[in-house]
């Protein structure tokens, strides 16, 4: 199996994405803007930033949001779920990917973290 690594972090031992054959695995994405600053806004703004970051990371691997088959979401406040869900639905119209969503504290001061698995065949 062919494995490609994208976006090796210079400080933290992780890669932002790994393509293993036809699958793309993204590390959990948090709401950092292009300058590397945490977007300290409401859940809607943070969710959009995370999903935009995911779209950009997928594009680098040759995939897109349309190729996402599974997401895992962590929310720091379960009360944000409905507002998060409204934004999420804008990015993943029907049929949406399989999904898990849990409440948890995060390692950075963010309201949301999302990781995805995408399926994009290398030879299409």
Image (spheres, grey):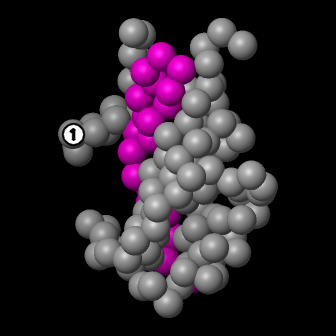
Q: Is residue 36 inside the magenta stretch?
A: yes
Quadrant holding the C terminus: top right
Q: Residue at x 39, y 24 (%)?
A: 5
Quadrant housing residue 92: bottom right
Q: Is residue 74 left or right of residue 64?
A: left
Q: Is residue 60 inside the magenta stretch?
A: no
Q: Residues within 10 Å of mark 1 (few under 14, many from 20)?
A: few
Quadrant housing residue 7: top left
Give the main secondary structure of the magenta stretch. Answer: loop
Quadrant holding the N terminus: top left
Mark 1 lies on residue: 13
From this view, report whether residue 69 is shown above or below residue 76.
Answer: above
Please provide the residue range marked out in magenta.
16-42
Q: Secondary structure at mark 1?
A: loop
From this view, report whether residue 50 is shown above or below residue 105.
Answer: above
Q: Residue at x 50, y 27 (%)?
A: 23
Q: Position of residue 85 (x, y in %)?
A: 63, 73
Q: Depth check: 58 or 103 in front?
A: 103
Q: Depth check: 33 or 120 in front?
A: 120
Q: Depth check: 20 or 31 in front?
A: 20
From this view, report whether residue 19 is shown above or below residue 77.
Answer: above
From this view, report whether residue 27 is shown above or below residue 105.
Answer: above
Q: Is residue 110 visible?
A: no
Q: Is residue 5 visible?
A: yes
Q: Is residue 42 left or right of residue 1?
A: right
Q: Position of residue 10 (x, y in %)?
A: 27, 37
Quadrant housing residue 57: top right
Q: Residue at x 63, y 30 (%)?
A: 63
Q: Residue at x 41, y 29 (%)?
A: 18
Q: Is residue 16 left or right of residue 62?
A: left
Q: Position of residue 88 (x, y in %)?
A: 65, 65
Q: Position of residue 89 (x, y in %)?
A: 71, 65
């Amino acid at each position: 199996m062919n494995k490609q690594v994208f976006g090796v972090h210079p400080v933290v031992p992780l890669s932002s994405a790994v393509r293993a054959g036809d699958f793309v695995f993204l590390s959990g994405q948090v709401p950092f803007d292009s300058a590397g600053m945490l977007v300290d806004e409401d859940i809607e703004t943070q969710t959009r930033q995370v999903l935009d970051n995911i779209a950009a990371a997928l594009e680098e691997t040759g995939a897109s949001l349309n190729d996402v088959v599974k997401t895992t979401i962590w929310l720091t406040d379960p009360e944000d779920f409905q507002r998060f869900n409204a934004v999420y639905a804008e990015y993943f119209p029907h049929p949406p990917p399989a999904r898990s969503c849990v409440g948890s504290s995060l390692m950075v001061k963010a309201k949301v973290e999302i990781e995805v698995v995408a399926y994009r065949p290398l030879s299409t």
